[in-house]
């Protein structure tokens, strides 16, 4: 059985309608039709693995170091979350936990699930995986909130004489993890989940 590409059809990434490859826009949603992304699954898997690798030091190393009277006090992402919870800054703590811990884990799980659906041709689960993938792609721009919070705290505390805050090595690892995840979601061709043949 030949694939949709071999039959001269293009699946719209937005509404999943099959169109002739001679058309430039989808007949249903008028979106611009694009050809397949070369080696999409391999690229996505590699970026996903890189993101997972970078998340390990991002969570184990200190994301910020507070200097009070010359004494360094390093803090990890979870340590910062606990600190803000104990100090009563619940909104900042929740933002840090959701943006820096919960969202990256959920994104990795969803992209891995989408890859599994595409790889094993689980077409009955493709629509659900597509919806989750679109949500993950939409919230991707909020993944850097934790780094922005650290940058904001650094700029605020620098005005004090007795203490200062600098970004720790986890900030770079977290940044690289976010970039790798953005590349993973960008390189994944969701139409692979709806293909009928291997």
Image (cartoon, grey):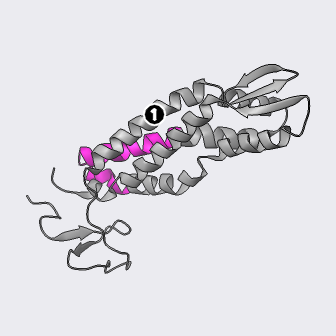
Mark 1, secondary structure of its residue: helix
Q: Dividing the picture into quarters, in which one does residue 47 lie?
A: top left
Relative to 12, residue 133 above or below:
above
Q: Is residue 152 left or right of residue 19?
A: right
Q: What span is colored magenta in the figure?
A: 105-128
117 magenta-colored: yes
Q: Does residue 20 appear to the left or right of 175 in the view shown?
A: left
Res 85 seen here: no
Q: Which residue is mark 1?
A: 52
Q: Residues within 10 Å of mark 1 (few under 14, many from 20)?
A: some
Lateral position of residue 75 relative to residue 126, left or right: right
Residue lying at 91% horizontally and 32% vertically, measured from the top left? 161
* In this rendering, position of residue 93 left or right of residue 169: right
Residue 100, position as x, y percentages in the image? 61, 39
Q: Is residue 116 magenta?
A: yes
Rendered location of residue 91, percent (x, y): 77, 44
Q: Residue at x 23, y 48 (%)?
A: 121
């Amino acid at each position: 059985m030949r694939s949709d590409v071999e039959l001269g059809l293009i699946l719209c990434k937005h509404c999943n309608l099959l169109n002739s490859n001679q058309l430039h826009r989808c007949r249903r949603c008028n979106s611009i039709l694009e050809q397949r992304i070369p080696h999409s699954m391999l690229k996505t898997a590699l970026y996903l693995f890189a993101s997972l690798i970078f998340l390990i030091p991002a969570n184990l190393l200190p994301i910020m170091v507070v200097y009070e009277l010359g004494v360094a006090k390093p803090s990890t992402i979870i340590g910062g979350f606990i600190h803000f919870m104990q100090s009563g800054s619940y909104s900042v703590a929740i933002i840090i936990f959701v943006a820096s811990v919960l969202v990256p884990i959920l994104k990795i799980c969803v992209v891995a699930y989408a890859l599994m659906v595409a790889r094993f041709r689980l077409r009955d689960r493709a629509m659900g995986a597509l919806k989750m993938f679109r949500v993950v792609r939409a919230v991707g721009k909020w993944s850097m909130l934790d780094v922005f919070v650290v940058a904001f705290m650094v700029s605020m505390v620098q005005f004090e004489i007795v203490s200062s805050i600098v970004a720790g090595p986890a900030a770079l690892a977290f940044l690289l993890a976010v970039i790798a995840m953005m590349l993973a979601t960008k390189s994944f061709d969701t139409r692979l989940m709806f293909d009928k043949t291997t």
